[in-house]
Image: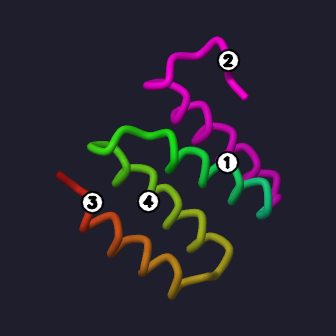
Amino acid sequence: MFNNINRELSWKVYIEAAQTYERMNEQRRTFEYMMQAVLNSPENLKWKVWLIASRSEYKIGNVSQARKLIERCLVEVP
């Protein structure tokens, strides 16, 4: 999708897009961009994506899923 953006930065663009869709209450698009952020983020920074994803899940009321993502974040943190 982002042909002119360095791979090391593309995950940040996906995060921003996901957060924008989150504010617009478009959960499907939020999830799609969050998954792209996970797939494109460097290994040492995946924990940040899981943390942001957890907050998104918590905001829509998925407390159990948010907790699972926090646990994943704790596993991934260097």
Circles 2 and 1: CB atoms closer than 8 Å = no
Mark 2 secondary-structure assignment: loop
At 53% from the left and 81% from the top, the residue drawn is: 65
Of helix, strand and loop, which one carries label 3?
helix
Asked whether 35 or 27 is in front, the reply is 35
The amino acid type, in three-letter code, at marker 2 is: Asn
Disc 4 versus disc 3: distance between alpha carbons? 9 Å
Evaluate if marks 4 and 2 touch, with contact meaning CB atoms under 8 Å apart: no
Q: CA distance from mark 4 to mark 2?
A: 24 Å
| Residue under the image location 62 percent in, 38 percent down | 14
Instruction: Check the image and name the residue furthest to the left.
Output: 78
What x and y, as percent, mark residue 68?
A: 42, 80
> Label 1: which residue?
33
Residue found 42% across the figure and 80% down from its top: 67
Q: CA distance from mark 3 to mark 1?
A: 20 Å
Residue at mark 4:
50
Residue placed under numbered mark 3 in the picture: 76
Q: Are marks 3 and 1 in contact (CB under 8 Å)?
A: no
Q: Is residue 32 above or below residue 65?
A: above
Q: Which mark is residue 62?
A: none
Residue type at tag 4: Trp
For the residues labelled 4 and 3, say whether their Cβ atoms are less than 8 Å apart. Answer: yes
Instruction: Tell which circle, 4 or 3, labels the residue nearer the N-terminal end.
Output: 4
Where is 73 relative to 46, above or below?
A: below
Mark in front: 2 vs 1? 2
Q: Would you say the residues marked 3 and 2 are in contact, meaning their CB atoms lie under 8 Å apart?
A: no
Residue 30 horizontal/vertical position (percent): 71, 55
Report the span colored magenta: 1-26
